[in-house]
Image (cartoon, coloured by chain):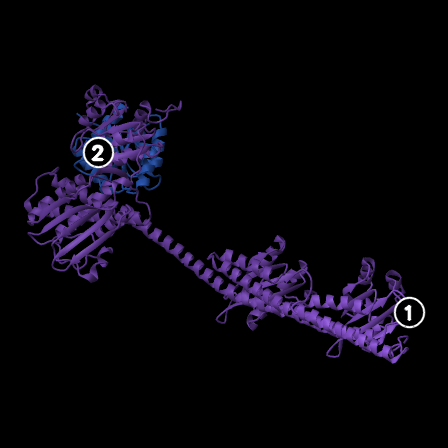
Amino acid sequence: MGGRALAGGAGTGVEHQRLQGQLAALSDQFAAANEVLSAVGRSAGDPDKVLATVVESARRLCRSQAAQLYVLEGGYYRLIKVVGMSDEAIQYLAEHPIPVDRGTMVGRAGLDRTTQQIDDVLADPDYNRQDLQRVAGFRTTMGAPMLIDDEVVGALAVWRNEVSPFDQREQNLVTAFAGQAAMAVNSVKLVQQLEARGAELARKVGELEALREVGEAVNSSLDVTKVLSTIAKHAVRISATDGGSIMEYDQDQRCFLVRSVYQTAPRVIERLRTTRIHLDETLVGRAAKLGRPLAVPDLGAADLDPHLAVLYEAGWRSLVAVPLLREGQILGSLVVRRKRPGEFSAETLTLLEMFADQSTLALLNAQLFRELKQRSAELEVASRHKSEFLASMSHELRTPLNAVLGFSEVLLERMFGELNERQEEYLRDIHGSGKHLLELLNEILDLSKVEAGRMELEYSTFPLRRLLDNTASMLRERASVHGIELRVEIGPGIDEVYADELRLKQVVLNLMTNAVKFTGDGGTVVVRATRSGAEVHIAVTDNGRGVPPEDRERIFESFQQGGRGPSQEEGTGLGLTLSRRIVELLGGRMWLESEVGVGSTFGFSLRSREDEPRLDAARSVGAVVVIEDDRPSLDLITAYLSGAALRVTVAGDGQSGLDAVRRVRPAAVLLDIRLPGIDGWAVLQALKAEPGTRDIPVIVVSIVDERARGAALGAAAYLVKPVSRDALLHALTAVGAVADDKGEDQ
Amino acid sequence: MNPGRILVVEDNPKNLKLVRDVLQFSGYEVIEATSGEDGVRLAASEEPDLILMDLQLPGIDGAEALRRIRSGERTREVPVVAVTAFAMDHDRERAFASGFTGYVEKPISIRRLPQQIKDFLRLGGAT
């Protein structure tokens, strides 16, 4: 209680002097207040400047050595602004703050809520901060509380280093300054509060941003495993926990199955996967049934279900189980956990719930996708089984058919005697029906091959005109019987095409056969090839009765002949289906344009010749050109060569054979003699006459044995059909097209 | 003059009869076997000039019968022609890989069979 209340000034001397002094004091005070106000006004936007001005002005106007501004925080006065103190003293004060008690000037001013002074701290019995006094060296000190709404928020203090009490004027000044400082501090607090709120907002925005990012990551995959592990990982991240797991709910077993685990020991993962997490017996189940997150702040104090027991044993101490729900249905559960016990904030639970919502949708999508994939895999297997069944069935059917065709042929050949007219007619019927059945079987087999992905295409380059002409000539006789005109029209710029010649022919033959079949007597069938950009279009147009719109898609399905009217003969009902599939396999597409009563056009596209990769002029090692027109022989040769690491180019006649050899410059040529167009002898002569092809060895493979002639024309070897695999490979090795044991190459 | 002795291995009796009748008509002598085991046995005891072997047989299949024929001292060189209804390309390739001299595709052509046999016999003689 040593603080003496300040009484009036030193009332001595003449009245005039007193008045003069008062005037000076008033004007000082006015100047001070003015200065404070103007400082505050200048730095209105910056409370820190206001406080600095306050401290500085207080020290100067109170004629003291030091001034300090404190704020009250956590029971201590903390120095926030100071002038006139040594760094050492400031440091000391920071380390030894002033408590709220009567041991200091500041403490007393706050407790009494009045401005007061201690004339000499060394003489005051209650003063107890001699330690500070020794460091700072003050003797007389005055303090004023900073009050906001009658609450002490801090204090302003000034001191003198000698014993020299402050007068009333100075007391008033300090009080006024303390008031200003309180306002400034208050505004700082408000700003800080605002800033804190802003930071909170920023944090919220950050969380939402994270949530969005997570949602995006989770939704960007349809792979269930990946989605689940992403969810687990991000859930742990946004909840700032140490690990987590995610479970899918199995409705049949009423159990949660752990699918993905994040930051957990492998041994524990294994145990989690094998633990039965039942809907009715676990915390995870309870959270799912309640439809909200359930937290366990301390596993050590909780009832442990089997799942929690595993976690507790593994050292986990707290967790939250968040159900994954969709329209009331339980899809799974998300569990995040910590290694230490502790509450989970409401914000964390809300965040996890929001996150679970997002994750559920992603999980649902991924689950549906997985199911779809499974179904389509099953369908694929079923389809393959069907194809295999068809393949083996058609094969089984061929065996008895073999006998039907064979025996009827034997009789028709009159191997065992003459036939009467009726017998011959019936035998032709038997044979014809057998043939038809065989055709059907072949198409079923082809179709099943296409569908099983087992139709192998043999690409070669050949003139389109030859194929179309050949096909047309196969039908000419049949067409002429019905007075049907058959025309082939090839547009400009179409020469060679690159495709499987036999398969392409099969398609064209099918379309033309259909056209002839469904065109009335005296009609016209035109096959037209036109160029369309990089493609060649081949279209077969008839002027039959046309296909009604409702049948235009159905007609491509198996065993559907559509409403094309009565045909002149039976078909297999598979031709169009197969044709379209072959065209698709060749990289094209098939279409139908039709008008009832006017006619139909079945067209398809084909990649043009330019798509074929060109070869360098240099002779290709390991390439063989096979010039052969007979399909079985070709099959045999390509089968023989299939194991020999050779690239085989096939040509079906002499001219395209020549072209192929010129283009490919193979290591060897296999040449048949009986060929449509220019025959094998002419091909051989031409090859040997040209400098570019002269040195390419030619192996003649023929049914006719004219070795001498072959040798005379320059054939490297001569094989008579049927050729064995060994003989063929031996010949190819001898000419150097196939590497022999010494590894020699041409 | 006897143009040759042909062993036909075929389990379907009607097809066996057909091939037999056609070959006999063309003047060949025909030995019949209805299983792979029979075929291997007859190949050794009868020493045919050519064997026509169905690929799908009860018991040991055509490929196994061929392997046994090829490992027999007296039957090592005999041409063996596969009669195949395997229309799948890879099956046919497999047949060739197992070492058949050639193949005849089912249904066999009555008109072409005698000529095909003649060609294969010539090939067998040449190697």
Question: What is the quadrant of the N terminus of chain A in the image?
Answer: bottom right
Q: Earlier in the sequence, mark 1 or mark 2?
A: 1
Q: Nearer the viewer, residue A704 or A113?
A: A113
**Residue that badge 1 annotates:** A120
Residue A73 at x, y percent in the picture: 76, 69
Rendered hue of chain A is purple
- Of all residues shown, which one is farthest toward the bottom? A15
Callout 1: residue from which chain? A
Numbered badge on residue A637: none
Can residue A286 be seen by looking at this rendering? yes
Residue A594 at x, y percent in the picture: 17, 57
Question: What is the quadrant of the C terminus of chain A in the image?
Answer: top left
Residue A436 at x, y percent in the picture: 18, 48
Q: Is residue A214 left or right of residue A240?
A: left
Callout 2: residue from which chain? A
Q: Is A195 located above or below residue A589 in the figure?
A: below
Q: Nearer the viewer, residue A391 or A322?
A: A322
Mark 1 surroundings: few (<14), some (14-19) or many (≥20) residues within 10 A: many
Q: Is B125 located above or below residue A566 in the figure?
A: above
Residue B16 at x, y percent in the picture: 23, 39
Say which amino acid is labelled 2. Ser
Q: CA distance from mark 1 to mark 2?
A: 124 Å
Q: Residue at x 48, y 60 (%)?
A: A219
Numbered badge on residue A656: 2
Point out the frontmost of discs 1 and 2.
1
